[in-house]
Amino acid sequence: MHASVSAAISPRVVLATTAEQMAAEELVRATRVEVNVPDELSRSFARLWLAFCPDDTRAAGLLLAWIAADELHVIDVVTRPEHRRRGVGTTLIATALAAGAARNLRLALLEVRAKNETAIRLYAAAGFAAYNVRRRYYADGEDALEMSLSFASRPELHP
Ligand SMILES: CC(C)(COP(=O)(O)OP(=O)(O)OC[C@H]1O[C@@H](n2cnc3c(N)ncnc32)[C@H](O)[C@@H]1OP(=O)(O)O)[C@@H](O)C(=O)NCCC(=O)NCCS
């Protein structure tokens, strides 16, 4: 791997507004993640965070979450392939969890393809634990793993 993109970095994370719409849409196109950026930016309960690496003007990663009552639902997380394994995903999740803790939310929830070991490891490292398997949840027959994190059990997240 090229040295300039393999080193761990400290990504800058911003909560996207319409000012970041084009950067977010470019990343969505590049990663083919199924996120409709204008729709999400217009939803009062949606939060779209973008990560930027110091060596790239394009967005390196995004995390989309919905706040429903006292729950933070992590809808999607993606890192641009050339910036993976540099801490972008970890930083995005830490940002979303800190925001959830600051709002006194109770639970963070997500579902992930059962074979997506990379994402499962990332979520487990952030404190999520699997609590259920939804059999054949996806159209291609793959199971979904449901994971949760209780903010009350993670006092270090609270500001
Ligand atoms: C999952 C994903 C977001 C991780 O993003 P990332 O920016 O590479 O994550 P990080 O660099 O913060 O890595 C965090 C941890 O995830 C795990 N991880 C990341 N990439 C990995 C890989 N290729 N193999 C194994 N574990 C991996 C490791 O535990 C890693 O910690 P470590 O580097 O200290 O060992 C990224 O791989 C991705 O965009 N995948 C495609 C989209 C996707 O599957 N999203 C999840 C949908 S639910």
Image: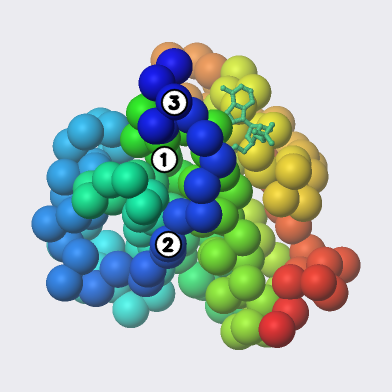
| Residue annotated with mark 2 | 12
The residues tagged by marks 2 and 1 sit, at their Cα atoms, a distance apart of 15 Å
Residue 119 vs 114, above or below: the answer is: below
- Between label 3 and label 1, give the one nearer the viewer: 3
Q: Is residue 36 visible?
A: no
Q: Is residue 9 left or right of residue 117?
A: left
Label 2 neighbour load within 10 Å: few <14, some 14-19, many 20+? some
Percent across and percent down for residue 152 are 83, 73
Percent across and percent down for residue 51 are 39, 55
Percent across and percent down for residue 59 are 28, 50
Q: Say which residue appears at 36% left-offset and 52% top-offset.
A: 54
Q: Earlier in the sequence, mark 3 or mark 1?
A: 3
Camera-side residue: 105 or 82? 82
Label 1 secondary element: strand
Q: Amino acid at mark 2?
A: Arg
Percent across and percent down for residue 36 are 21, 51
Q: Amino acid at mark 3?
A: Ala
* CB atoms of marks 2 and 1 within 8 Å: no
| Residue annotated with mark 3 | 3
Q: Is residue 83 left or right of residue 128?
A: left
Give the quarter of the figure containing the C terminus. Answer: bottom right
Most extreme residue toward the right is: 153
Q: Is residue 77 visible?
A: yes
